Amino acid sequence: MEIEPFSLSLSEPLSTAAGEIDSREGFLVTLERGAVRGVGEATPLAGWTESTEDCESALRDVVADGVDSACPDPAETPAACHAVELATADLAAREEGVPLARWLTTDPAESVPVNATIGDGGVDAAVEAARKALKDGFETLKVKVGARSLEADLERLRAVRRVAADVTLRVDANGAWSRPEAQRAIDRLADLPVSYVEQPLAAADLAGHAALRGRGVGIALDESIRERGVDAILKAGAADTLVLKPMALGGIRRSREIAVRARKRGVYPMVTTTVDGVVARTAALHLAASLGIDRACGLATADRLSADLASDPARVRDGRMHLPDEPGVGVRFG
């Protein structure tokens, strides 16, 4: 197994739990068997995964142990596990001569709808972003809320709805609201209408999220997965939708197992990225396609990077990302 560090500049700073960052640093992991090569990506993100230093240490331990397919602990070092697991899966799919999604399941979707994200800027910025997204063919918009008062956010959302009357509208509060604020917000959001609100309450508050369900707007949980775990969320009946980040969950196969389990409990899985490079981003697309997800996923994040690891084989076209035809993940190097 070979490990190659990389650093990708961001097109604009990204806010994380550890502060703003202006680049995404990580490691490409390469496995070879004969003439076939599999590639995985570890791109740690503070607050979601282990640190870059711990990720590298876990990967070096795999090299030292000499067992290329042995994943690091997904609970402690999920990004490192993601890389080793993905390299192993990419290698196996390439050996079989099939795209990764078809290696995961016999009948994957050929493409996956994706959403555009509108930041927490003012009314004019939100309207401009919505118009651009419509021009680019997006049919689902996710709007960041919670940084302003509820009335200010409602004004932004009404303005977006006026220029994007037929799109599916979602909002993401990133845990900004109290229980009373969330109840008021959801009652008002139902009239717009809004499909779901992502993480309205603090990540640990599963009982509060459960109480918000059934008020006309779906509840999607993201940060709660990291904070409380999927089993606790399902047991509490706290979500209508789970937002799955393979990099933070330890890989695409682990994410797929969670998605299948959630569906059996009536909870819809969505797939998104942690602003990863093209290898992990395209692998997340394969995961979503293998699950037959027909609701927009948060995979349209390539524009957050000003540079990438290789050419993107699955650029967004008319609000969708289409699976590469080539074996494995489908990303070419060199």
Image (cartoon, helix red, strand yellow):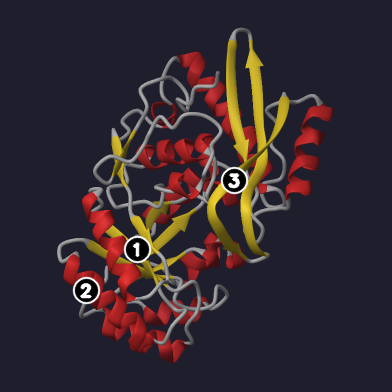
Check disc 2 and report the residue beneath it. 193
Q: CA distance from mark 3 to mark 2?
A: 37 Å
First along the sequence among labels 1 and 3: 3
Q: Earlier in the sequence, mark 1 or mark 2?
A: 1
Bin the neighbour count of mark 2 within 10 Å (Cα to Cα): few under 14, some 14-19, many 20 and up: some
Query: Residue shown at 35%/22% (left/top)?
Result: 325
State whether residue 181 is above or below residue 124: below
Query: Residue 37 location in percent, x, y?
Result: 59, 17
Element assignment for label 3: strand
Q: Specify the label residue 142 is tagged with.
A: 1
- Left or right relative to 295: residue 43: right
Residue at the bottom extreme, as displayed? 180
Marks 3 & 2, CB-CB < 8 Å contact: no
User: In this view of the protein, which residue sits in the foreground, 18 or 263?
Assistant: 18
Residue 280 image position (x, y, % from top left): 53, 39
Q: In the rendering, at what x and y percent does residue 123 appear?
A: 32, 75
**Coordinates of residue 194 in the picture (x, y in percent):** 26, 71
Please give the residue where the numbered disc 3 appears in the rendered image. Answer: 9
Q: Which is nearer the N-term, disc 3 or disc 2?
A: 3
- Residue 324 lies, with reference to residue 298, above or below; the image says above
